[in-house]
Amino acid sequence: MAAADSSSAALRRRDLCSRGIRLAGKMRSDVIDLLDTYVERQGLDASASVAVVEGVPMAAVEHWDEQTGTQRLLENLAAYRAFRALLAQMLEEQQEQLGEADAALGQALAAVLLQVSAFAYHLEELLRLESRGPPSEEGAGPPPPSHLGLFERKLWGLGVLRELAQWAVRSARDLRQLTKPSPGSSLAPSPAESP
Amino acid sequence: MVGEAAELLQMANPVPSACCMVLAVVVVVYAQRHSQQESHIQYERVGADVTMKCGSMDWDAAVTWTANGTDIDESHLNGSYLILKKVDLTQSGQYSCYEGSSWHLKYQTYLRVGTPPREPVLMCRSNNYPKGFYCSWHLPTPTYIPNSFNISVIHGTREMVCEKDVFPKNRCHIRYLQLFSTVKYKVTLTVTNALGKNSTTVTFDEFAIVKPDPPESVVAKPVPNNPRRLEVSWQNPSSWPDPESFPLKFFLRYRPLILDQWQHVELSDGTSHTITDAYAGKEYIIQVAAKDNDIGTWSDWSVAVHATPWTEEPKHLTTEAQVTETTSASTSSFMPPPTTKICDKGAVVGSGAVAVCWTAGLVLAAYGVLFI
């Protein structure tokens, strides 16, 4: 019975990882398209350099290959929960500023927001499979950058989308690591991790 | 007589040792002076006017200059100075100045004519993602004199070490410290020689420079009994460190040799493909390229392979067995098949073999008689 449960869990995990990888790929493709639309609609330069973006989870990581499976899932989940809040905020601001005048940008933002939510769900399911359960959400998300002017807010939005595009690539790689039969794919918690 | 000779030798003994000592000192001093002078190198630009002074000799001293051992005409001299107008590359060489009467070497230099470096060409690429990337460079035109290269790699506020390769010398590699960063890399290459310096900078994203090496071991084979198929297989480039976590996708192109237009197929997984629309009997040329599934650009095309789809063998020759079967089944008079030359002397070697040949012919004739 235990073996059957374990086998079933393994199949479910593999299935979630495969679907997650495909979703991450589609999400990245849509975010790239959204970036083009956003830059055009907001009158920005596509090559504009954006400094460290306040309140946005950075995809950049050191010693990526040494992370455990649990670390990967937890970091991904925290990031996508944050992006869910950030994109909701961007969507709200976009509708306030441009409203029906720019339905295309609003629709594109909403579509990506949906994919981000779906991906967060995938990650929560994967953590549940490990009898770990996802951590509870820490409230509504990062505070909005209210001190920024209009142009700075546009650049901030550009930074959010760029970072999301990086996360989509990283997430696909993370999920592939989970499907590998190696120490890196282990989902056993490391001693340093808090439950 | 012998005694007198011995006396002379005794008297002469002290002299050879003193002479040897003096000679040795002279040789050492001469060698030292020459080695110091030979190490002096003078770099000048192409087209420059060069004036060489003969060491500490006065302007009006009588001197002789040589270039690579050949006397230089006095028309190139201004007093004891050597004047070379608008030097070119052929004037590189060893220049020596000798005092007029004594032929003492007073000055020597090695003139190297060249140019300051032009802006170097620099490129960076990751063919082993996610391990790291390499940068390589070259000068668009030669300088004809030695150059030194210095490269700096900055990522955000961090300066990274680019380890120079032993071969090729114009390349260095960097290990990634971070992955999935949006911060750009800035690489600056400075080239310096005795006549000047120049530099160039490239800036790029981590993902933008990812370009695998071409696929390896491409093989194309016909498929038996399928005149329109070719089976193609290949391997991931050996430089790609982790195809499981960082899978590659592939692009295959093929065309018959007689046509210019390529057919293309993109393959998202697997390292094989069956072409099903090949022209029967035509030789094909096939190549494969690779790209990371998510980021970067396509590799160069692989080495081309050639293959021709399977064709049925033409039935233009009948065998002896077929003749026998035909004869045994026939009710008409025996007629040897025109292509069969049982007793063709050109095909048979040796008198013994000829005898066997005629025997076989008689047997066949007997069969023919029996079945008329």
Image: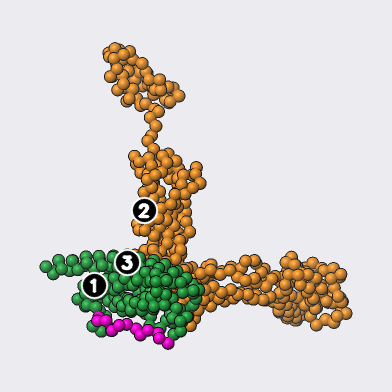
Q: Which residue is mark 3?
A: A23
In the image, which lettered chain appears green?
A
**Quadrant of the image containing the N terminus of chain A:** bottom left
Q: Position of residue B115 (x, y in %)?
A: 69, 71
Residue where numbered disc 2 is placed: B272
- Contact, mark 3 vs mark 1 (Cβ under 8 Å): no
Residue nearest the observer in this picture, A13 or B102: A13
- Labels 1 and 2 share a subunit: no
Check contact, mark 2 vs mark 3: CB within 8 A. no
Q: Work out whether residue B77 or residue A104 is closer to the camera in this orientation and state it.
A: A104
Dot 1 and dot 2 residues touching (CB under 8 Å): no
For mark 1, does the 10 Å Cα neighbourhood hold few (<14), some (14 to 19), or many (20 or more) residues?
A: some
Could you say which is closer to the camera, residue B35 or residue A48? A48
Q: Residue at x 26, y 72 (%)?
A: A121
User: Which residue lies most toward the front here?
Assistant: A100
Indicate left or right for B180 with A49 as reference. Answer: left
* Residue positioned 67% across, 76% down in the render: B196
Residue A50 in the figure: left or right of residue B1: left
Which of the chains bears the disc numbered 2? B
Magenta segment, which residues? A135-147
Residue at the disc numbered 1: A125
Asked which secondary structure carries label 1, the reply is helix
